[in-house]
Image (cartoon, rainbow, N blue to C red):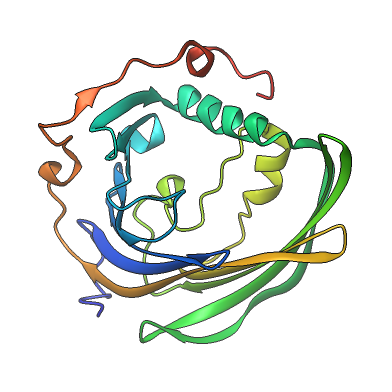
Amino acid sequence: MLVSLASVCWAGIVYTAEMEKFGKKSSIEVWATDTKAKFSVLQSDDPSMPTGTTVIALDRGERYIMLIPTKGVYLDLTKQQFKNLKGKQAQDSGFEFQNGKLEELIIDEEGGTVAGIQTRHYKIRISIAGSAPGQKLDVVATEEFWTAPSIPNPAPSLDMLTEQKSGNRQLDSLMAYKKLRGYPLKRVVELSMNGEPAGTSLVEVKTILEKTVSDSDFEIPPNFKKLEIPAQVGAKNDNE
């Protein structure tokens, strides 16, 4: 539940959320201040997000720590290296972006309540033309957002709920929707590919509180060892 929303100065916020992606479920916890944020997976049956997976954003997103619990190691990345890593993941998938457009369907209407908090509702549609090995792909993503104007966003550049990075500059600019008013509490994405349904994902905040967030919340566990950055991650991304 939310505490002292009227407070002008926020030391930070902590929230828990439930995620469902293509039928796989995860629960997460996020800590955020004006310069730092941490996203940690509490429980998961999603192999792409194992329990314990953690991303720590520092210095207003200029530095990222990625904890890999299955191997007991972490990566210490600059902002550019983090983008390069996302770009490599996109390249490994084989998808090549060609062009796209964004349509606004619903802008800032009454959205009901999420986690007991009054929200505003937004709906957009992103159409993307691209290709994968051996086929042409037309992808449509219909996205809905519910936001709480009553909750200040301590670090909009570190938003762990709606932040999306593919590593492709054109695609990322399409996905970085800037008109959301207030703190994001819920997001639903429906995908179709070549006119056929391709899956749905959901993220919804369940509890959210104002809380003093200390530096210790962002520390690397002492039993984790630093992993050297792969050369292809350190190199400049041609999509930038």
Q: Using the image as rendered, state which of residue 125 and residue 229 is in the foreground.
A: 229
Q: Position of residue 229 (x, y in %)?
A: 39, 16
Q: Position of residue 51 (x, y in %)?
A: 30, 53
Instruction: List x then y, in percent, for residue 71.
Output: 28, 33
Query: Can residue 183 be seen at all in this image of the molecule?
Result: no
Q: How many marks?
A: 0
* Viewer-proximal residue among 130 and 212: 130
Q: Residue at x 25, y 80 (%)?
A: 1
The quarter of the displayed image where residue 150 is located: bottom left
Residue shown at 71%/47% (left/top)?
Answer: 174
9 or 118: nearer the viewer: 118
Q: Position of residue 96 (x, y in %)?
A: 78, 34
Q: Residue at 66% across / 50% down in the picture?
A: 175
197 relative position to 146: left or right: right
Q: Does residue 5 lie above or below 104 as drawn?
A: below
Above or below residue 240? Residue 128 is below
Question: Compared with residue 21, is residue 83 higher up or lower down, i.e. above or below?
Answer: above
